[in-house]
Image (cartoon, grey):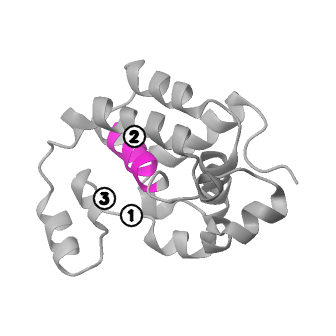
Amino acid sequence: MGVGCKTDAEFLSLFRKFYSDPPSNASVELLKKLALEFWYGHLEIEKLINGELTNGSLTSLQARRAMYLVDRMISFPCLSRNKAKLLRDIVKLQGADLKNSPPSKAAEHLFKEYKLDKKAFEWGLESDITMQMKNLLEYQTRHFAATTGKKTGYSE
């Protein structure tokens, strides 16, 4: 069973769609495709993501949304250790300045009310993908990886 994106262009299209709108607007289907590529795909998404962040075309808000997605996706152990390390390096290098943006009053209120996840708050966002991620639990399991024959962080 093939999972993830078939081409670099497909991944970039999905990635751009994600960071162009508030995270809470992302559809479950969009997040599923992105998550499967992050967790099990074979594209060199770290190079694609790094290129996207360094080409100068993203606003600060778009870059923070993009980094939030990367930061969320690398927190799952189904990601291979090597890919996780490469993506963590991007978060550290590219995200250092972006994470220093002070959160808005709205974000502070949402966070205090437990309506905004910590990572979204840290990236200075006012929405997150918590609700959509609940629909992706089945793809984060050893069973899913075994059924699809994918090597993961679980099997390393």
Q: Amino acid at mark 2?
A: Arg
135 shown above or below 59: below
In front: label 3 or label 1: 3
Give the alpha-carbon distance from disc 3 to disc 1, as whole Å.
Answer: 8 Å
Residue 148 in percent (x, y) is at 82, 58
Q: Which residue is mark 1?
A: 128
Quarter location, residue 24: bottom left
The tag earlier along the polypeptide, 3 or 2, is 2
Extreme-right residue of the structure: 1
Task: Using the image, tell me which numbered label, if any, was put on residue 145.
Answer: none
Q: Nearer the viewer, residue 127 or 34?
A: 34
Tag 3: amino acid:
Lys
Quadrant position of residue 141: bottom right
Quick one: which residue is furthest to the front in this view? 156
Please indicate whether residue 91 sits to the left or right of residue 44 in the image.
Answer: left
Near-viewer residue (154 or 109): 154
The relative height of residue 92 versus residue 113 in the rendered view (above or below) is above
The mark closer to the camera, 3 or 2, is: 2
Q: Mark on residue 88?
A: 2
Residue 110 in magenta stretch: no
- Dot 3 corresponds to which residue? 119
Q: Residue at x 11, y 63 (%)?
A: 105
In this rendering, is residue 119 above or below 143?
above
Mark 3 crowd level (few <14, some 14–19, many ≥20, 10 Å Cα): some
The outermost residue toward the top is 55
Query: x and y percent of residue 68 in the render?
Result: 38, 50
Point out residue 154 in the picture as x, y percentages from the top left corner.
61, 59
* Callout 3 touching callout 1 (CB < 8 Å): yes
Could you tell me the amino acid type at mark 1?
Asp
* Boundaries of the magenta span: 63-72
Helix, strand or loop for disc 1: loop
Q: Earlier in the sequence, mark 3 or mark 1?
A: 3
